Image: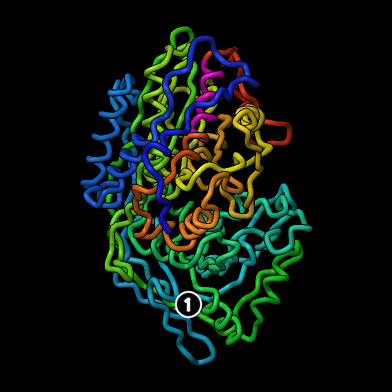
Amino acid sequence: MRLATSVAVLAAGAVLAACATVAAPAGPAPSAFDAARLSEHVRILSDDSFMGRGIATPAEDMVVRYLSEQYAAAGFVPGGPGGAWTQDVSLNRFTASNIHADFKVGGETIALNQGQQITISTRLPGDHVAIADAPLVFVGYGISAPERDWDDFKGMDLRGKVLVALVNDADFEEPALNTFNGRAMTYYGRWTYKYEEAARQGAAGLIIVHETAPASYGWTTVQNSWSGPQFDIVRANAAAERTGMEAWVQRDVAVDLFRRAGLDFETLKAQARRRDFQPVVLTGARFNGSFDVATSRVTTRNVIARLPGTTHPDETILFTGHWDHIGVGTPDANGDAIFNGAVDNATGTAGLLEMARLWGAGPRPERSIVMISFTAEESGLLGSEFYAANPVWPLATTVAGFNMDAMNVYGRVSALGIIGYGQSDLDERLGALAVAQGRTVAPDTNPAAGSYFRSDHFPLAKRGVPMAYSHGSGAFRDAPFEARNTARDEYGARRYHQADDEWSADWDLRGQIEDLEVMYEAGRALANSRDWPAWKPGSEFGPARAASASARR
C-alpha cells in the first residue's frame, strides 16, 4: 500500500534543536536535510538502468561515477589510497552450475532441486565439486565456543562428512538458558560463522536447515541470496577457512530426511539446546552432490570521500553504508529479474550523500569526516571487511562511526532503535538526541535476528572502533497508521531481497530525516570535541580498542 504524501509535507521534517542535551559544537548547523534530494538519489540508484547494483558488473562503474560526483559536489575530496575516490577490493567470484544433488536413505532417493528444496554454493576456489556417498551428521547448532563451555562436535572426526546444522543459536528456542545471551543472537548464530566452523572441522560441506523465525527471513530470501554468484575476499589458505559446499535446505525436507533415518527432528532440536549434546549420525543416510564452479578474480570498489578537519585532521569520524545489491537474478512471478534494492540500501546511500552535503555546507569540523560507500555487503560484508583489514585511515585514531542500512521510508516513528544496545556509550549520545526530538530509545527490538552482525559496522566494531547502527522504530506518529504499518510489514514479507524492493514517489521520508539528524548531530559534537567514545565494560570489542589506547590523546 502506498502513502500519498506530497513533497511539501516530506520536506517538513526540519532539523530540530536536538543537540540541546549533548555538548554541541559552536556555530550554526547548516540547512535541513532535504527529502526531495533523498528521494531523487534513491530513484536514480534503484533505477532499472543500474541493474540492481551488482558488484563487478557494468552497473558498478555507474554507481562509482555517481557517488564520486555527488561527494565532490558536496565539497569532499577523494579519501581512498593515493588520493583516489575508490579503494580496490580484490575478491574471488564463484558461480555454481550443473548442480545435481540428492539424499539417499532407506533405499530411496530424495531429489534436491536448486532453489526449491536446497540452495548450493561454494566459496572455495576450484572448477568442480563432487561429493559422493558422504555420511550425514547432525551437529546441532554447529558451534564450538570454549569460553561458553560449549562444543557441538565433541571431538568426532568429521572429515569428509556433510554436516547438518540449525540456524541461529540454542537460546532462540529457549531464552531462559542464557547460554548465548538469551534471544540476542551472538556471532555463533550467524551462517557465516557456521560455514567457517565446518571448514575448521574438516567437513566436506555444511547444510543449514532453514526455519523462518530463527533465520529472521523466509526461504525466498535464501533462494535469491544464494542461487547466484558468491564472493569472498582473496585468502592465503582458503581450504582452511572454506568448505567445498555451503548449502541451505528447506525445513520440511530436513524433517522428512530425519524421519526416514529413524530420527525425530524436533526431539533432536531440543537436545541441541544442551551442553551435553552429542553429534548424531543419520544412520543409512548419504548425500550426493556435484556441480561445476566458474572461479574468477574480480576487483570491486569501496568509494571513500573525505572532508579534512581543521585542527585534528588525523582523527576520523566515519559515516558508512553499502552501495551494492543483488543485481539481476531469476525472474519473479511478474517477470521482474532486477533486484533494484531501493530500501536496501539505496536509502542508506542517499543518506550518506545528503549527510555529505550538510557537512560541506556547514562550518569545517576540527576532526576529519570520512564517508565510505562499501561494496559487497550483500556477499558477506566483504567491502567493509576489506577496509577494516586494510584501513586507509588508521583505526586507532578513528573516533567512532555511524552506519546506515535500509532506512525508514514510511514516516515519523516514536523511537530510535539502537542495534547492539549496551555495547558502547554511543547509545547515550544518540539517545539524548532522539529524546530531544520527542522520541524514546528502543534497544534492539529483535536481537534474535543478529542484526549487529549483519551490516557494515561489524568488521570495524570487532576491531575495536565504536560503531553505531540505529534506525527508526516503534509506532508511527502520524495518520494513516494502518497504511503505514501495512507498508512497513509488507516490505519485510514481500520486498526484502526481492525484485519488488523499488522506489516510490509516495514515500514519507520524515522518519529517515529524523534518524539522519540524530547521526549528524552526534557526529558533529564528536568532530568538534576531544571525546573518544568507549566500549562499555563487558563488551567483547573493548579489548581490541584498549590495545591501541596509546595512539589516542
Residue at 49% x, 71% y is 249
- The image quadrant that residue 123 belongs to is bottom left
The percent coordinates of residue 169 (x first, y second) are 65, 58
Residue 124 seen in render: yes
Disc 1 secondary structure class: strand
Q: Is residue 54 depicted above or below 216 in this figure?
A: above
Q: Is residue 428 left or right of residue 11?
A: right
- Three-letter amino acid code of the residue under disc 1: Phe
User: x, y (%) of residue 303?
Assistant: 33, 32
Q: Nearer the viewer, residue 413 or 211?
A: 413
Q: Quadrant of the N terminus?
A: bottom left
Q: Position of residue 282 (x, y in %)?
A: 60, 79
Spot occupied by residue 426 in the image (x, y as percentages of width and height): 62, 29
The C terminus sits in image quarter = top right
Label 1: how many Cα within 10 Å (few below 14, some 14–19, many 20+): many
Q: Which residue is mark 1?
A: 287
Q: Is residue 162 above or below residue 484?
A: below
Return the residue nearer the eye: 517 or 198: 517
The relative height of residue 124 versus residue 138 in the rendered view (above or below) is: above
Which residue appears at 67% of the width and 51% of the height? 184
Residue 497 lies in quadrant: bottom left
Q: Is residue 276 above or below residue 306?
A: below
**Which residue is pictured at 49% across the width and 23% down the height?**
317
Determine the residue located farthest toward the top in the rendered image.
311
Asked if the magenta segment contains residue 507, the reply would be no
Magenta-colored segment: predominant secondary structure: helix
Q: Which residues are magenta?
A: 515-527
- Front residue of 317 and 235: 317
